[in-house]
Image (cartoon, helix red, strand yellow):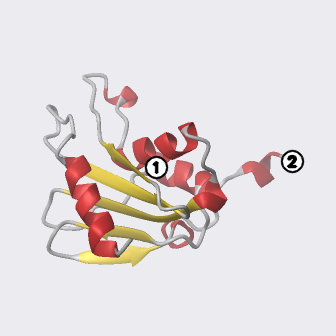
Amino acid sequence: MEDNELLGLAYQARSHSYAPYSNFHVGACILCADGHYFMGANVENASYGVTNCAERNAVFAAYSYGYRKQDLVRLAIVADGSTIAAPCGACRQVLSELVAPDMPIILSNGKQTVVTTIARLMPMSFGPGDLH
């Protein structure tokens, strides 16, 4: 799947966002090595702490179907706004454990696009190795 197709699916996911409080709509789509993809949108709650972000929803969906880190190839995250929105801290923590450190993460707001990795977004992350 080309990046434009992956971004298109992320924008499609964004259209399903539930963001009545922030009005900040985010969509994500993750591509698996076997060609399957999983989309996610942000879903807000009046109790902000139980809100879930689009990228976590997409990754959790892939994991719910049995996919794991080695199966995930690319992640696209798209958001409203005049600047590109990078994953929040909670999402970075989840991504640091559930995706490969060098897996491409495509960030876009429709005007600008940046390709990065979780290793660049969250150096010196805390993970399973720190628990031993």
Viewport quadrant of the N terminus:
bottom left
The picture places residue 119, in percent across and down from the top left corner, at 57, 70
Question: Of 36 and 64, which appears nearest the observer?
Answer: 36
Q: Amino acid at mark 2?
A: His
Residue 63 percent coordinates (x, y): 57, 43
Is there a contact, CB below 8 Å, between mark 2 and mark 1?
Answer: no
Q: Is residue 81 left or right of residue 73?
A: left
Q: Quadrant of residue 43?
A: top left
Residue 21 in sight in this render: yes
Q: Residue at 31% across / 29% down in the picture? A: 48
Q: Secondary structure at mark 2?
A: loop
**Which residue is depicted at the point 33% across and 74% down?**
3
Q: Is residue 127 left or right of residue 54?
A: right
Circle 1 crowding by C-alpha within 10 Å: few under 14, some 14–19, many from 20: some
What amino acid type should be assigned to the residue bearing mark 1?
A: Cys
Q: Which residue is mark 1?
A: 91
Query: Toward the viewer: 94 or 103?
Result: 103
At a point 46% along the width and 55% down the height, the residue shown is 36
Q: x%, y% of residue 72?
A: 55, 60
Q: Which residue is mark 2?
A: 132
